[in-house]
Amino acid sequence: MGSELHENARTLVAEGKGILAADESDSTIKKRFDSIGVESTEDNRRFYRELLFTTPGVEEYISGVILFDETIRQSAEDGTPFPELLKERGIIPGIKVDKGAKPLALSEGETVTEGLDGLRERLAEYHELGARFTKWRATYSIGGGRPSEYCAWANAHALARYAALSQEAGCVPIVEPEVLMDGDHTIEESAKATGRALQAVYTELHDQRVDLYGTLLKPNMVLTGYDASGRADIEEVAEATLDCLYRHVPAAVPGIVFLSGGQTDEDATAHLNAMNAKGPHPWELSFSYGRALQAPALKAWGGDPANAEDAQKAFYRRAKFNGAARTGSYAPEMETAAV
Ligand code: 13P
């Protein structure tokens, strides 16, 4: 079992490739569809996700797709179940298994992620449906003494319990501690909070016997708060993020797949590119973007099936640029060139 987990983890961070996060929960996909004036019906969600998964050539840059519970049970127009369709294209299907970040008791403004009850049984079913990796997201906010030690350890403990169960079920766990970049914090405060969250996570993963070679980490990048003035530039973000990772992430972890977390799609690509340009590093540095891969496609689609091809082209472009950022060979000029 160990070697299959190790192999799948490495395949997900193969050279030039990364992960598409298409695991928006019902409430999150509704927000995305609201932004383009499209009603979030089951069929619209199915159509939109089929459009992404069948984009010609995208498997050159996409190694895995994270699905949501509804999506892993859906099929393409021709009846092929989505996990099957992805596998046929050489893309590994994955699944979000957490049940969302809920208020942390007795700690104003903090959250703990739920979903451990019944997780062993759900994982067995997802594995049967074809999933070979999973995701669990914890969130932390900055400011007013947050994140607290209590929040850091409660989430780390849950992340490690999830990761151990996922490995037991034969699925690579993507461990996602996301320090939110909302607020006016400095980049130094962001580095401190991110480092604290990561250190607790790796202590718990070790104590709960998780095999790090069969895991991936999905962290935030270390940014200045979105509401702050005097924001750190691309180089500063790359340096601060790398410094934080070098201090807190063991080299046994095969890959680090960043979330985009509300950055513009171009910033998310440029930051990843700058970090890889400073390589080689002990781990592969890749992407597991949701918004930063989908935003242009969502806009181009706008809910009209006649725009499906344009939307696929927009998705292909972002996937290709992020693929280039995996080797530090992305340049902003590519944004205006024909693909
Ligand atoms: P974003 O890249 O839009 O932050 O989404 C990634 C994700 O899966 C968050 O859990």
Image (spheres, rainbow, N blue to C red):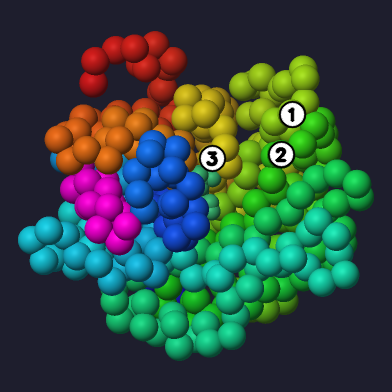
- Image vertical order of residue 40 relative to residue 287, above or below: below
Q: Position of residue 238 (x, y in %)?
A: 63, 29
The tag on residue 182 is 2
Q: Secondary structure at mark 1?
A: loop
Q: Position of residue 124 (x, y in %)?
A: 40, 84
**Do the numbered discs 1 and 3 sit on residues whose CB atoms are within 8 Å?**
no
Q: Main secondary structure of the magenta part?
A: helix
The tag on residue 314 is none
Q: Secondary structure at mark 3?
A: loop
Q: Give the mark nearest the N terminus, 1 or 3.
A: 1
Instruction: Kindly tell me whether mark 3's CB lies below 8 Å from ligand 1.
Output: yes
Of labels 3 and 2, the one closer to you = 2
**Do the numbered discs 1 and 2 sit on residues whose CB atoms are within 8 Å?**
yes
Q: Is residue 150 left or right of residue 83?
A: right
What residue is drawn where x is 36% and y is 83%?
125
The tag on residue 260 is 3
The tag on residue 227 is 1
Furthest toward the left, the residue is 78
Q: Nearer the viewer, residue 317 or 244?
A: 317
Q: Give the mark nearest the N terminus, 3 or 2.
A: 2
Residue 1 location, quadrant: bottom left
Which amino acid type corresponds to the residue marked 1 in the rendered image? Asp
- Magenta segment boundaries in residue numbering: 41-55
Does the magenta segment cover residue 54? yes
Alpha carbon of mark 1 to alpha carbon of mark 3: how far?
A: 17 Å
Alpha carbon of mark 1 to alpha carbon of mark 2: how far?
A: 7 Å
Q: Position of residue 258 (x, y in %)?
A: 54, 44
Q: Nearer the viewer, residue 324 or 296?
A: 296
Quadrant of the drawing holding the C terminus: top left
